[in-house]
Image (cartoon, helix red, strand yellow):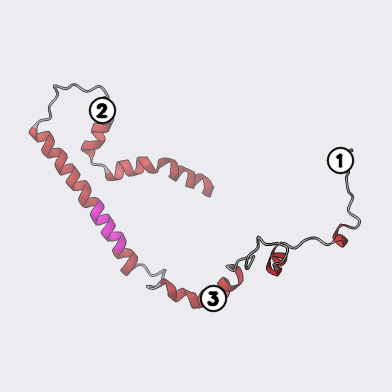
Amino acid sequence: VMNTVAMAFIVNIDEILFEAILPAHHRNEVENIDFLLDKGEVDSQQDILQRKQAFRSSFWYMFFACVFLVCYAEYLQDVLPPDITMLGDRCKEFIDEYQQPFCNGWTWYLRGNPSARECFPFPAASEFEGVPVRSVDG
């Protein structure tokens, strides 16, 4: 169910943004788009002013949306601490246990490097005792 909701969000995000951000004037233009343009067609002064006003409105909408997000993230939210490094003390045990690399040192030099043998242990012959071996011929 969650994957379905996520997929619906991904599929519809462009339409949601189109409806939310683009002014109605521009949405109508996109709806009535005609890819064959007449060269003699000139926009009137009223259309140009209307277009400028629509762009100005969209700019201020986006500007205030960004300002709101920054103010919310910095001053209003109470989930994360103001300084993310403050989480280091509380998460130290988890980081020490789960975030350490599996292999230490130069693991590509397999013959002489002991850390490579710990990282990529070679099986002992005793591990294969009793295991049925199938020949290539059949």
Q: Which residue is mark 3?
A: 92
Nearest the camera: 121 or 73? 121
Q: Residue at left 27%, top 55%?
A: 65
Give the mark toward the camera: 2 or 1. 1
Residue type, label 3: Lys
Q: Quadrant of residue 105?
A: bottom right
In screen coordinates, is 45 left or right of 138? left
Q: Residue 32, labelled with which disc?
A: 2
Q: Is residue 129 above or below residue 56?
A: below
1 vs 3, front mark:
1
Residue 129 x/y as whole percent: 90, 58
Query: Where residue 128 sits: x, y (%)?
Result: 87, 57
- Disc 1 marks which amino acid? Val
Query: Which residue occupies the extreme bottom position in the image?
Result: 89
Q: Is residue 28 above or below residue 38?
A: below
> Could you tell me the amino acid type at mark 2?
Asn
Q: Residue 69: where, in percent of width, then height?
A: 31, 60
Front of the two marks 3 and 2: 3
